[in-house]
Image (cartoon, rainbow, N blue to C red):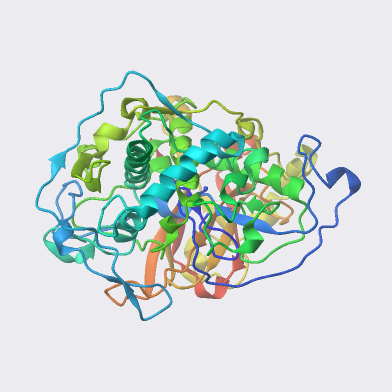
């Protein structure tokens, strides 16, 4: 469940891949809608927030089921081998999305590589919430970025060089050793969280070195709280090194993040949007992510064909990107505290996967996933702030009485066809199918195994912004993303023309846990589940092959 993040008017991908993964400064769409927000007086603003909103202008944050839930296509010649570090001397320029121009994100070359060692430390750095820091902290961070920008252009610690680190791993700058037609892609798989954790770690170490403060810690954008759902003010000062002039002006405060962005603005009051965001956070972080596979993502090994990454060659050029990913990294830490089967993957091919980063001394360092699983061993923790979405469990969209009446009309509902009867098909209209549930063998299996809705063979072009929402047992289409019936969303961010291989279409899948939903809807004993797919953007461009329910232990 990678956290994927874009700002409106750019496009997004929703679990969270919050994959919620990156701030996008290039403009794919250019919507500048002036929409007034007509709220009832008691909805105009939160009583706990001292802000007023004159119009509806939302940021977009997709919180990620698409990317990390995707299954990678394994090569018939692949063996169980972890992804190795790339050969930086074989890095290649890539095509900028939606253009014919190329960009060279490749780092300075070197023949010396050192192995990473966990740092000795006596004090723990505390990463603060960006909207809560004081002027002294802002001044210190601003100075660090100024010094980073002032480094020589060929210094791997230079700010642009640091942005290029993300570019090379994101837009096919590296290929898998021995496989020139298979790139290394750190999005949409179990590599997403550990790679970005290391990326922030070394960026933070460079800041510490430049300002001579080993206790300095990067801020995180606390977009999972009401107070943090606007861009933190430390990033809005046009005279600051933390400001990006390419950022769309409509994203500035008081614009609010939108976790369910559909490609266009809608007339929703900001405080109502905040409450909807919190319910979506609960669904993504709690209900949909009970196992390591559902949260961290599918396996990605040497020889596997990666799914397309986003066209985010310039994403890390905005300092806000690092604050966003700070919160994404924080989600990984929080997820492991929620109990149940929430733990890191023990597969050696996950633990031994390797990357390359330049450290604070401009040395090229080889790192392994297994050394970053505990952020405390890297010398940092996150400030303890409110987590309001833990108490934001969605409620059913209809009353229990109506649900019982619905069961009484079973003969009518059962006439809805099965997936095998209607698929494969384009999603050019609302699709309803009755999906048979797998039988659980024992009470132990009933208690310990997750039921996962799997939508396979989702085929579309890389450069199309497309989205559909998934609802469970919502026969009358009465529910919204605030309700229990909402299972999650698939969102594709346009990937542009950066690929070297000329492939315009790709296939992926969406996996959503529905155990909690069925429990809340009093449907645990039903033999079938009514699954509704509602296209909200570019449904004509989406084709689906299969819908089924599987058991995930």
Give the camera-side residue of 498 and 350: 498
Count of number-bearing discs? 0
Q: What is the quadrant of residue 42 in the picture?
A: top right
Quadrant position of the C terminus in the picture: top left
Q: Is residue 415 visible?
A: no
**Residue name at image x 72 percent, y 69 percent:** 33
Residue placed furthest toward the bottom: 100
Left or right, residue 523 beside residue 504: right
Left or right, residue 352 beside residue 289: left
Is residue 228 placed above or below 256 in the rendered structure?
above
Is residue 361 placed above or below 4 in the rendered structure?
above
Left or right, residue 208 beside residue 274: left
Q: Position of residue 534 (x, y in %)?
A: 62, 62
Q: Position of residue 146 (x, y in %)?
A: 43, 49
Give the camera-side residue of 123 and 478: 123
Residue placed furthest toward the top: 122
Is residue 212 placed above or below 18 in the rendered structure?
above
**Residue name at image x 56 percent, y 48 percent:** 528
Q: What is the quadrant of residue 342 in the picture?
A: top left
Q: Position of residue 218 (x, y in %)?
A: 45, 38
């Amino acid at each position: 469940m990678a956290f994927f993040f874009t700002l409106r008017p750019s496009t997004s991908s929703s679990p969270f891949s919050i994959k919620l993964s990156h701030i996008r400064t290039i403009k794919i769409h250019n919507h500048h809608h002036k929409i007034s927000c007509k709220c009832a007086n008691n909805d105009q603003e939160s009583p706990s927030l001292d802000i007023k909103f004159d119009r509806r202008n939302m940021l977009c944050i997709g919180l990620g089921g698409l990317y990390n839930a995707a299954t990678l296509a394994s090569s018939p010649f692949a063996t169980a081998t972890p992804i190795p570090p790339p050969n930086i001397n074989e890095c290649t320029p890539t095509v900028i999305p939606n253009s014919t121009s190329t960009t060279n994100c490749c780092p300075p070359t070197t023949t010396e590589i050192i192995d990473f060692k966990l740092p000795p430390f006596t004090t723990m750095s505390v990463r603060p919430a960006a909207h809560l820091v004081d002027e002294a902290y802002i001044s210190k961070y601003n100075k660090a970025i100024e010094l980073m920008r002032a480094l020589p252009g060929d210094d791997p610690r230079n700010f642009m060089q640091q942005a290029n680190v993300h570019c090379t791993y994101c837009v096919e700058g590296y290929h898998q050793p021995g496989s020139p037609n298979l790139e290394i892609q750190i999005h949409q798989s179990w590599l997403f969280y550990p790679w970005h954790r290391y990326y922030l770690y070394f960026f933070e170490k460079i800041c510490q070195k430049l300002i001579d403060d080993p206790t300095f810690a990067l801020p995180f954008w606390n977009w999972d709280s009401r107070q943090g759902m606007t861009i933190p003010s430390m990033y809005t000062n046009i005279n600051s090194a933390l400001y990006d002039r390419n950022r769309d002006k409509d994203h500035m405060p008081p614009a609010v993040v939108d976790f369910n962005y559909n490609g266009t603005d809608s007339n929703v009051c900001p405080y109502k949007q905040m409450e909807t965001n919190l319910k979506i956070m609960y669904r993504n972080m709690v209900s949909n992510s009970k196992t390591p596979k559902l949260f961290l993502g599918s396996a990605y090994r040497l020889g596997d064909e990666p799914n397309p990454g986003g066209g985010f060659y310039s994403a890390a050029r905005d300092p806000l990107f690092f604050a966003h990913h700070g919160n994404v990294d924080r989600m990984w830490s929080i997820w492991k505290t929620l109990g149940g089967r929430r733990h890191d993957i023990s597969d050696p091919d996950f633990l031994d996967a390797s990357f390359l980063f330049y450290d604070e001394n401009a040395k090229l360092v080889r790192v392994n996933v297994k050394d970053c699983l505990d952020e405390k061993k890297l010398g940092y923790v996150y400030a303890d702030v409110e987590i309001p979405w833990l108490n934001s469990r969605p409620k059913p969209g209809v009353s229990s009485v109506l649900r019982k009446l619905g069961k009484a009309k079973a003969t009518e509902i059962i006439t809805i066809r099965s997936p095998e009867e209607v698929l494969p098909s384009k999603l050019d209209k609302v699709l309803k199918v009755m999906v048979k549930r797998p039988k659980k063998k024992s009470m132990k299996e009933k208690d310990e195994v997750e039921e996962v809705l799997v939508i396979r063979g989702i085929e579309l072009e890389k450069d199309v912004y497309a989205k559909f929402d998934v609802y469970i047992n919502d026969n009358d289409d009465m529910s919204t993303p605030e309700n229990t019936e909402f299972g999650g969303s698939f969102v594709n961010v346009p990937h542009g023309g950066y690929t070297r291989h000329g492939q315009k279409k790709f296939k992926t899948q969406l996996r959503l846990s529905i155990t909690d939903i069925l429990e809340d809807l009093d449907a645990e004993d039903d033999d079938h589940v009514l699954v509704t797919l509602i296209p909200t953007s570019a449904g004509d461009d989406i084709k689906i092959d299969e819908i089924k329910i599987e058991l995930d232990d």
